[in-house]
Amino acid sequence: MFDSKTLLLLKPRGFCAGVVRAIDIVRIALEAFGPPVYVRKEIVHNRFVVEELQQKGAIFVDSVEEVPEGERVIYSAHGVSPEVRANSKLRKLRVIDATCPLVTKVHVEAVKFAREGYSLILIGHRDHDEVIGTLGEAPAVTQVVGSPEEVKSVTVPDPNRVAYLTQTTLSLDETRDIIAALRNKFPNIKGPAAQDICYATENRQVAVKHVASDADLLLVVGSDNSSNSKRLVEVARALRTEAHLIDNYRDIRREWLNNVKTLALTAGASAPEHLVEEVMQYLATQGFRNVQELEIMPENVRFGLPPEIVEAIAAAPAGAAVES
C-alpha cells in the first residue's frame, strides 16, 4: 500500500488539552509569582516535561507535607484526594489546581454516587495517581478493579445499588470487557452519563487501530509511567502489530527496524512534540524519509485556566511575558 521505508505520522498525537493546561499553569505561575513554585507529584507523566519545568524553578514533591507552610503549591493534572486538600489547608498553602477537568468530572461522579448510597467500582490501575485521588473521594464504599478476573471477587452490601467509574486513560477494549463482566455480575449496575475515558485517550487509540494493519512496527513516544502511552502499545499488540514504548529516539533499537518497510509513529498525551521530531530525524537517517501524516480525526479541545492564573495574567504589567 505504501512505498518502501514509509513513516506514518499519526494525528492526533501528543499533548491533550488537559496536559497543555497543566503545563501552562506551572509556566505562568513561575513567570507571575517567581520561583519557588511547588508541584505535588509530576505535573504530567513525562520526565522531559518535568525536567524542563525544574530548570525554570518548579520544585516537585511527593507530598504537600514537603511544602513549607504558606507557600504556593500546584496539584498535578491527575487530581488529588480530599485528604490532600485538607492537609494543604492545614499548612496554609496557596493552592493552584491543575487537575484535568475530565478527571474532576470523575471525582464529582464518585461523590454523587456515594451520597446516593451506591457501592462504587472504580476501573483502573491501583497505583496510578489519578486512581489514588478518585478513590479518596469515597474510600469506604469504593473498590478498584483492573481486569475482568478481578470482578469475580467483588462483593457489595446490595447488588442492586452498585455503580462504576473508570480511570480516564484506559484501553477502550479492556475497559469494555471489565464493564461487561460487571454488568453480568450486577445487572442493575449504573455507570456515568458519559464515558469517563477521555477524548484524547480514545482518539489516539482509534488512530493506532486505523493504521495497525498497514504498519510493520509502531513506536509510541511516552514515559513508562504514562498510562495512556502504555495503552497505545497494548492496542497495537492486540492487533498483532509489533509496538514499543520509547522515551525518546535513544531508546530505539536498530534490530527493531530490520525488515520494516512501514513504520507508524505516535505519542502519548503527555509527550512533547519536540521528542516526536527528534524521533523522525533519527528515523530519516535509517531510511524512513517518506513521511505521511495521517489525521484520523480533528482535535480542537481547549480548557480554561483556573482563577488564580487568570488573575495573575490580568495583573501582569502591559508587555510582560506572562501569557496563556
Image (spheres, grey):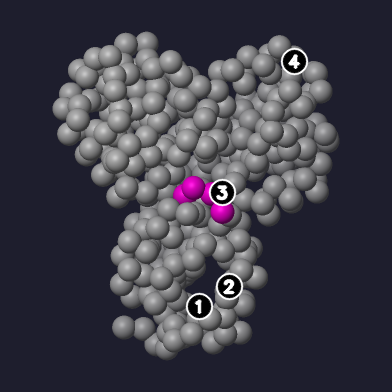
The residue tagged 1 is: 256
Give the amino acid type for the residue marked by disc 3 in the picture: Asn
Whichever of labels 4 and 3 marks the residue nearer the N terminus, that label is 4
Task: Report how far apart the C-alphas of labels 1 and 2 lie in the structure.
Answer: 7 Å
From this view, report whether residue 253 is shown above or below residue 120. below
Quarter placement of the N terminus: bottom left
The residue tagged 4 is: 91
166 to the left or right of 248: left
Whichever of labels 2 and 4 marks the residue nearer the N terminus, that label is 4
Find out whether the residues at labels 2 and 4 contact each other: C-beta distance under 8 Å: no
Q: Residue at x 70, y 38 (%)?
A: 26
Task: Report how far apart the C-alphas of labels 3 and 1 lie in the structure.
Answer: 22 Å
Q: Name the spot of residue 277 as percent of width and height, x first.
A: 60, 69
Between marks 4 and 3 in the image, the one whose residue lies nearer the viewer = 3
Badge 2 density bin: few <14, some 14–19, many ≥20, Cα 10 Å: some
Residue 299 makes an appearance in the image: no
Find out whether the residues at labels 1 and 2 contact each other: C-beta distance under 8 Å: yes
Label 4: element kind: loop
Give the amino acid type for the residue marked by disc 4 in the picture: Arg
Residue 229 among those drawn in magenta: no
Which numbered tag is attached to residue 26? Answer: none
Task: Report how far apart the C-alphas of labels 1 and 4 lie in the structure.
Answer: 51 Å
The residue tagged 2 is: 252
Q: Residue at x 47, y 35 (%)?
A: 126
Chief secondary structure of the magenta portion: loop
Give the amino acid type for the residue marked by disc 1 in the picture: Trp
Give the amino acid type for the residue marked by disc 2 in the picture: Ile
Q: Residue at x 74, y 19 (%)?
A: 93
From this view, report whether residue 112 is shown above or below residue 55. above
The residue tagged 3 is: 225
